[in-house]
Amino acid sequence: MCIRDRALFDPAKNIHTGSQILVDYLNDHSGNLRRALLNYNGSLGMRSSFADRVMRVYRDFQKVTTPG
């Protein structure tokens, strides 16, 4: 394992790097979050529940954090 790989075990660096990757996929898929998540998970073009689970949690967070 190289130094750079070890750095990904640092939670802050891991979240930062993962966020950058997801933003790149969002740009690649014209802002389509579901397709970006499938790409992030490596399951674009395959059957996967990953994106649906993430989208469900995302909607739940929106409900509790959106005023009104």
Image (spheres, rainbow, N blue to C red):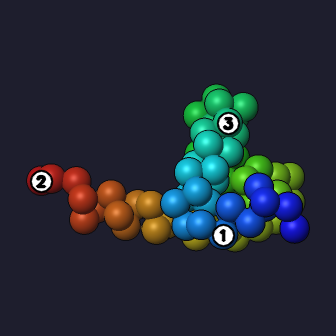
Query: Which is nearer the N-term, disc 2 or disc 1?
Result: 1
Residue bearing the label numbered 1: 9
* Residue 46 picture quarter: bottom right
Give the class, few, some or many, for how many residues have Cα within 10 Å of label 1's Cα (few <14, many ≥20): few
Q: Quadrant of the N terminus?
A: bottom right
Coordinates of residue 10 in the picture (x, y in percent): 59, 66
Q: Is residue 1 left or right of residue 24?
A: right
Secondary element at image label 1: loop
Q: In 3D space, how far apart are the residues under numbered discs 2 and 1 (Cα atoms)?
A: 38 Å
Residue drawn at 85 percent across, 61 percent down: 2
Query: Which is nearer the N-term, disc 3 or disc 1?
Result: 1
Residue drawn at 73 percent across, 53 percent down: 40
Residue bearing the label numbered 2: 68
Residue bearing the label numbered 3: 24
* Residue 6 picture quarter: bottom right
Q: Is residue 29 left or right of residue 13?
A: right
Residue 55 is at least partly visible in this image: no
Coordinates of residue 25 in the picture (x, y in percent): 69, 40
Secondary element at image label 3: helix
Please state which of the two labelled residues, at mark 3 or mark 2, is closer to the viewer: 3
Please name whichever residue, 41 or 3, is drawn nearer the observer in this view of the structure.
3
Query: Which is nearer the N-term, disc 3 or disc 2?
Result: 3
Please name whichever residue, 26 or 68, is drawn nearer the observer in this view of the structure.
26
Q: Is residue 66 left or right of residue 62?
A: left
Coordinates of residue 29 in the picture (x, y in percent): 69, 34
Q: In 3D space, how far apart are the residues under numbered discs 3 and 2 (Cα atoms)?
A: 32 Å
Q: Amino acid at mark 1?
A: Phe
- The numbered dot on residue 34 is none
Q: Amino acid at mark 2?
A: Gly
Residue drawn at 28 percent across, 62 percent down: 63
Give the class, few, some or many, for how many residues have Cα within 10 Å of label 2's Cα (few <14, many ≥20): few
Q: In 3D space, how far apart are the residues under numbered discs 3 and 1 (Cα atoms)?
A: 21 Å
